[in-house]
């Protein structure tokens, strides 16, 4: 299973459909270091919306630094669950 291709396809679709208010909220959560909201976004299947952001907040930097690992773990569980 090619997770990289799947993520790219989802990113293309999501870039066309992500409402501006969600993008605004994500920028605010990253700026404020609201890790709870960022985790909720990832666990709801929208973690790819966090890629490509640069931040100054140290908590958000740490979270984004671990994001790829987090997404791989989630994808592994999804693969096990769905086959």
Image (cartoon, grey):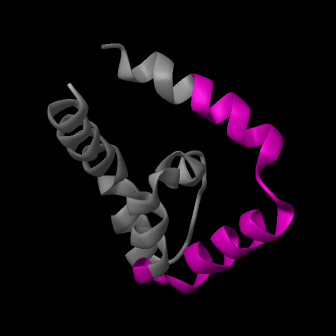
Q: Which one is nearer the viewer's eye here, 2 or 68?
A: 2
Counting from the top left corner in percent of width and height, residue 75 is at 28, 37
Q: Which one is nearer the viewer's eye here, 59 or 78?
A: 78
Q: Is residue 43 magenta?
A: no
Q: Is residue 47 above or below residue 5?
A: below
Q: Which residues are magenta?
A: 9-36
Q: Is residue 7 above or below residue 75?
A: above
Q: Main secondary structure of the magenta part?
A: helix
Position of 9 with respect to 70 (left or right) is right
Q: Quadrant of residue 21?
A: bottom right
Counting from the top left corner in percent of width and height, residue 41 is at 49, 65
Question: In this view, which residue lies farthest toward the left?
Answer: 80
Identified at 59% across, 78% down, the residue is 29
Quadrant (top left/top right/bottom left/bottom right) for the C terminus? top left
Q: Is residue 33 magenta?
A: yes
Quadrant (top left/top right/bottom left/bottom right) for the N terminus? top left
Position of 80 with respect to 59 (left or right) is left
Identified at 34% across, 44% down, the residue is 68
Identified at 54% across, 47% down, the residue is 51
Counting from the top left corner in percent of width and height, residue 63 is at 36, 65
Q: Which one is nearer the viewer's eye here, 9 or 30?
A: 9
């Amino acid at each position: 299973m090619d997770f990289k291709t799947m993520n790219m396809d989802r990113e293309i679709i999501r870039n066309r459909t992500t409402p501006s208010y969600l993008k605004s909220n994500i920028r605010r959560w990253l700026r404020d270091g609201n890790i709870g909201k960022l985790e909720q976004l990832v666990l709801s299947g929208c973690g790819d919306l966090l890629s490509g952001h640069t931040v100054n907040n140290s908590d958000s930097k740490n979270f984004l630094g671990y994001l790829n690992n987090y997404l791989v773990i989630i994808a592994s569980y999804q693969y096990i669950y769905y086959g």
